[in-house]
Image: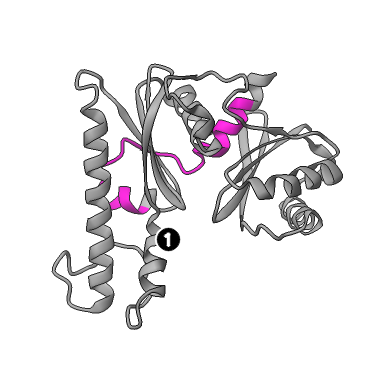
Amino acid sequence: MNYLLTIDVGNTNTVFGLFYQEELKRSWRIVTKRDRTSDELGVYLNNFITSSGFDLKDVQAVIYSSVVPAFNPILDRMIEEYYHCKPIKVTYDMKLPLNFLYPRPFELGADRIVNAVGGITIYGKDLIIVDLGTATTFCLIRENYYEGGVIAPGLKMSMEVLHNRTALLPLVEFSKPPCGILADSTVHSIQAGFFYGWVGLLKEIIHQLKNQYPSVHFQVIATGGLAGVIHKEVPELFDIVDKELTLKGLKIIYDYQK
């Protein structure tokens, strides 16, 4: 069996996905540590793969996207030493089923490019893709042209900063507080501020992006760990939630290179 290993290196987490043909068989997530050695990374990943019942020798190819340049040499070394193949690294100027109207595509994070490719291939043209990761990013794709987007602070990061920079405010779970907007405790106050505040941020930015082309019907695709939490409470905000969009996009780009 020939497996494709896909890797998405983010500022907070690194996600691995193992594909057989068109099916994502399994995915794993670890914390991104810039000082991790290639051997540490290789042992972690080998343990994930073998403990899930897969054979290491069946991993025949690797593709990755990364927004952490310092991590790339570690990843390259690990892939070559442990999987004996040369990885494909996603860049804006490689062969892609996507065109750029964005005037500075070399500034785009590879994850945003991968999400855009995955989005238009799976869901069609005219998309707004929202990724709730370390940063909250918005990408507008019209036809198969990447036109631009928005970067806002990350939700989890903002909650951690509030906790770390205050003496009395606890770190709480992101959720809709049972009391609603008028909070009855410190924990619920923080939850209300972040839940309703972030829903408002998402609604307004999506609204303003749609206003760029009032006659175009945009699908709103959300990805990232907290997208499902928000969608459950405010289902009209996103049309589709796809937590594996980045891994799927990597698989599509790999196939496109072939």
Q: Quadrant of residue 131?
A: top left
Q: Classify mark 1: helix, strand or loop.
A: helix
Answer left or right for 47 relative to 120.
right
Count of all numbered marks drawn on residues in the image: 1
Answer left or right for 194 relative to 1.
left
Answer left or right for 98 relative to 49.
left
Confirm whether residue 236 shows in the render: no
- Which residue is at a point 19% across and 22% down the rendered structure image? 214
Quadrant (top left, top right, bottom left, bottom right) of the C terminus: top right
Image location of residue 81, percent across then percent down: 86, 45
Image location of residue 49, percent across then percent down: 74, 50
- Which residue is at a point 62% across and 22% down the rendered structure image? 94
- Which residue is at a point 37% across and 34% down the rendered structure image? 149
Tell me the residue that label 1 is attached to.
Answer: 157
The kind of residue on which mark 1 rests is: Met
**Span of residues in magenta:** 229-253
Q: Quadrant of residue 22?
A: top right
Quadrant (top left, top right, bottom left, bottom right) of the N terminus: top right
